[in-house]
Amino acid sequence: MKKIILTFLTLLAISPEFLKADEGMWLLSKIKEYNIQTMQMLGCNLTAEEIYSETNPSLKDAIVWFDNGCTAELVSSDGLLLTNHHCGYGSITDHSSVDHDYLTDGFWAASRKDELPNVGMSVSVLVKMEDVTQKILSAVKGMDGQAREQGVMKASKELETNASNGGAYTATVKEMFRGAEYYLFVYEVFKDIRLVGAPPSSIGKFGGDTDNWMWPRHTGDFSIFRVYCGKDGKPAEYSADNVPYHPKKFLKISLKGYDKNDFAMIIGYPGRTNRYLSSYSIELTLKETFPALVGMWESKLAIMKKYMDADDKIRIQLADEYASIANVWKLYKGQIGYGMADALIGKKQNEEAAFTKWVNSLSNDSLKKTYSAVLPALKKKYDEFRPNNLPTIYGNQLLSLGFSSYAYRFMDLHTILTTEPLDATKRDDAISKLKNYTTDQFTKYFAPADQETMVSYLDAFAKGVPADKQGTFISDITSNYKAATPHESFVKYAADIFTKSIFISAEKANAFLSKPSAKTLDKDPGFLFAQKAIVFTSQFPSSMQLAGAVKTDNRTYIQGMRMMNEGKAYYPDANSTMRLTYGKVMDYYPRDAVYYNWYTTLTGVMQKEDPGNEEFIVPKKLHDLYTAKDFGDYAYKGDVPVAFLTDNDITGGNSGSGVLNGNGELLGLAFDGNSEAMTGDFEYDPLLKRTIVVDIRYVMFIIDKYAGAKRLIDEMTIVK
């Protein structure tokens, strides 16, 4: 009887119904060693080599990194790319105008000659990744601190140069576990990327900021690009003579759908996680840094929205910046709200207590000495930094203002102009670079919004920075621009800068660059403001300096944790390198008496429709297709699936990542996380962490039935 029960429990343990998602964003080269058996028990039908291979076509060849920080996937033999609408948003806005408002109307290239080029855009295709830990560590043996960092840089540069094959590839060495391990990544970088299609924002951004980070979701968050290359198949700058790229591997499109508990994996480029930080770091971040940023950004968003609502030209001009800020603002706001911060800090403190208990149990005196010192050392450094945190945050945000960050770029030119004897070559080179940057600076710059934001940031600085840390920053302004209140002084100060400074318009800036003078810069109020902000922030240690100061301690702490949990496979924090996460299609219970299903449908879009709210407008054609039930091949149980959930472990940078079934076929595009697990950059919660995915059937439905772009459907390989 015991044997029967044991056999039953064993079968239960390996059944996909009971297997849980594996926390982690895993390096593909380690899948065979750490993960493939579990993945196959969950429902993966592929071998490790079919997922990652350096010599044969594999899934890694179909996944690309967008230089805007997103992921995309190749879905045809002619270089067709799918990614999120919000990942293509900058390109869509760049091509939009009041007369051709692709944000509002969408864009669909009628033929390949109509596909729109994007200056400066690139995608990277991974050639290989290589563990070079021993090569790096042997080069820095016995080194520590800055000497070690410089040694790592030198050794990395040599490896990167050798791997670049004379410039044919781009290579970079990335550190893992705070410098305990190192990996070399080699890429082929394609620079001719063209916009092929995008739905209107009423589909691609349906739900807007209200639904962002929320479930249930009904957003058709996708856009389409194509990779072009030279006729030799190699990367090339844009040319009308370029041809579509033929990848080693592209993804098939699955219309078979999914059920709850079906296997799902995601391959992409997650940006940054900090899963192994101490409670001291988490507390400083969530209790002080994020609240300060959330308050300032909330004010900036309100100012931008006011101008965007009043003028379509300004709406298009500011749309990309607004969307980027709004996304991070809501993420940070969620991370510090709902008791998440306190709960996470408590979990970290419990981990540290367990670590301390383990250290005290060690019999090796040398190890005990090393690991017993690490947490007190971290606490001491964070305690010492804390009084300087808010001044640097508020000071850096003043430097981030549009005119201020632009003026900062003129600092080098000022140095050249004031150095005797004058180096004309350096001067001319600096002027040339600034002229190029000036074009970019004013393409989407709107001075009135920047001026109001400056006032709001000075208000926040005056209230948020402790009086004993402000120096004369505020008092100088209030004494030179006298008024009844500090706020009114800030208004006068901003008006003076935005009336007199050369950094407010392209015309003034270019006029200066045609005849540059140090005296002009020395008198310019915008330049003086940037200088003042730099001088202010430079008197405090920066967050970068803190990161450097605690790096060795963090590395030691992680090494100790791995030693304490010997036998457990650890994944490195995300750092914009290709990773794989696997799990299942999954529903969840967010709180008491509330249940969320694992997918949404087009019916839900109609239920959310609100013609009076720009975030919930439904295009007439979509409404007509729904009413007629004209769903084509994309229906499921009499409706069109719009989005679904998995328990995959993702973060920013995974936007646009393909969600694949057990055969490596495309089920959808990951585009968001859920509000109940917004601290996912710091922890993985298996009960609440969910990835929100736009269903590929909805993507195909919009391309085919809504846009009538059947040429794109015909180009893909569809699996029914």
Image: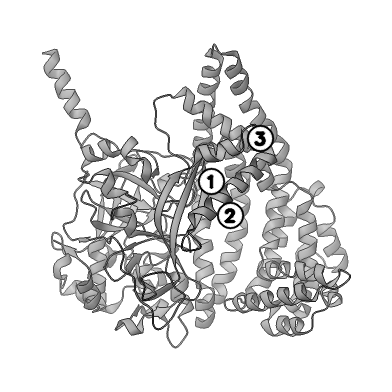
Q: Amino acid at mark 1?
A: Ile
Q: Secondary structure at mark 2?
A: helix
Q: Give the CA distance from mark 2 to mark 3.
A: 40 Å
Q: Are marks 2 and 3 in contact (CB under 8 Å)?
A: no
Q: Secondary structure at mark 3?
A: loop
Q: Position of residue 79 (x, y in %)?
A: 32, 69
On screen, 297 above or below 320?
above
Q: Which residue is mark 3?
A: 143
Q: Are marks 2 and 1 in contact (CB under 8 Å)?
A: yes
Q: Give the CA distance from mark 2 to mark 1.
A: 9 Å
Q: Secondary structure at mark 1?
A: helix
Q: Are marks 3 and 1 in contact (CB under 8 Å)?
A: no
| The N terminus - image quarter | top left
- Residue at figure coordinates x 45%, y 81% from the top left: 96
Q: Amino acid at mark 2?
A: Val
Is the residue marked by circle 2 packed among few (<14), some (14-19), or many (20+) residues within 10 Å? many
Q: Which residue is mark 1?
A: 336
Q: Which mark is residue 294?
A: 2
Report the side of 18 relative to 89 (left or right).
left
Corner quadrant of residue 248: bottom left
Circle nearer the N terminus (2, 1): 2
Which of the two discs, 2 and 3, sits closer to the camera? Answer: 3
Residue 216 visible in the snapshot: no
